Amino acid sequence: MTKVADISANYGVVIHRNFVPLYADDAYAQLFGYSRAEQIMALPSLLPLFSEADRVRAVEDYQALVSGSARPKARVFNNLKCSGEIFSALCIDHLIDWQGEPALQVTLVDFSQQIATEQRLRESEQRYRSLLESSLQGIVVHHNFIPLYCNQAMAELLAYDSAEQLMALPSLLALVPHELQPQVMQQHERLLKGEKVERSLVTEYVRRDGSSAWLHISEALVSWGEQQAVQSVMMDVTQQYHNQRRLEFQANHDSLTGLINRRAMSEVLIENYALSRRTSKPLGCIMLDIDDFKQINDRFGHLAGDEALRSIAFESLKVLRSEDYLSRWGGEEFLLLLPDTEQQQALDIANRVRQHIAEFAIQRGEQRFSATVSMGLAMLSEQDSSPEALISRADVALYLAKESGKNRVEVAPTVYQL
């Protein structure tokens, strides 16, 4: 809220009987543009100091006070400076005894500056509201998530018919997914405390129809009436958000099988390798290869080979645990990572996948065929100096499985036995 000047610098005192001045101080004189009180005392009447429209009321009020038919009170009059300029002033009346006869003491307070300031604020607020209403961006002002104002663009962003419908919500937190509300509340509290926070972010809101809207939000503290509030300017970036997510998915996933690709799996492998080293938890790494994949391509065509890759990826995921990672490593090879898994459990998982694939019939149009896979399992050991060393041992075990008849799982020897 705008702070106005101290009122004590803008008041003066005059005493009169029937508007004939009996006493005035310099401050009173200066309110009217005079330099000294003597100039006020030289006036035959104080009535010319009132605006013409207020003179009759001033006389009536004086007579009522002197006769006792009215009690002293504060009144607002428009007054005239010696220059002819009109200013508004508050008159605070007191009946006193002056040399044995009643007189009226008036404390005159000039609050024209405050009125002008308030008028400017009202005009400024009106212009501000006009800007808000015409903005193409959604704008909402709230205090502790209780809406104080929102424009039509904000309502439309969230699929409401009117700003009034949005304003009728008891709390704007209802627009935020439940799991995000603690984070949003914490951000709001820090902002009110004046702490340095991220004032521009992208977050999810819930539209009236239940769909998600991703909004870019810029927040700032504002004064709204006599209270502090938060103004949020919102722009719909839902399409950009989904485009970004799609690009991120494409960068990290194999386009044919939908599995994470070699690049993404390499990052997962590095993280889990470091975690297992730090916690001494077991880590299983399986290299999986489709047996006789070239024959599938030669006999049924490359499109059938593509269908085999898709089907084996999908069917493998059916029997794996939610915490396991499966990626397309390249060609007809897949890499399977089993965090926090002992060797026997890893073997059981590998054979479950192998058996499920062997029993599954791959269908493409009228073509129907089956495929088998061979696997090499390597458990992380102290001798594995890097994630690549672990993969290398899994690859050796895969070679052994191929050499031993295919459609089987082999366990890699330790690095010293390679």
Image (tube, rainbow, N blue to C red):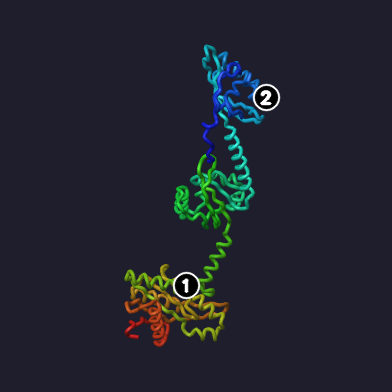
**In front here: 27 or 330?**
27
Residue tagged by mark 2? 52
Q: Position of residue 157 (x, y in %)?
A: 59, 53
**In front here: 208 or 261?**
261
Q: Which residue is drawn at 63% across and 47% down?
A: 131
- Type of the residue with mark 2: Glu
**Quarter of the rendering occupied by the C terminus:** bottom left
- Up-down relation of residue 385 to residue 230 (above or below): below
What is the crowding at mark 2: few (fewer than 14 residues within 10 Å), some, or many (at least 20)?
Answer: few
Q: Which of marks 1 and 2 is nearer the N terminus?
A: 2
Q: Where is residue 198 in the image (x, y as percent from the top left)?
A: 49, 56
Instruction: Specify whether 319 is left or right of 124.
Output: left
- Type of the residue with mark 1: Ala
- Up-down relation of residue 187 to residue 14 (above or below): below
Secondary structure found at label 2:
helix
- Up-down relation of residue 99 to residue 277 (above or below): above
What is the crowding at mark 1: few (fewer than 14 residues within 10 Å), some, or many (at least 20)?
Answer: some
Instruction: Specify whether 265 is left or right of 246.
Output: left
Residue tagged by mark 1? 264
Q: Which mark is residue 308?
A: none
Secondary structure found at label 1:
helix
- Up-down relation of residue 38 to residue 236 (above or below): above
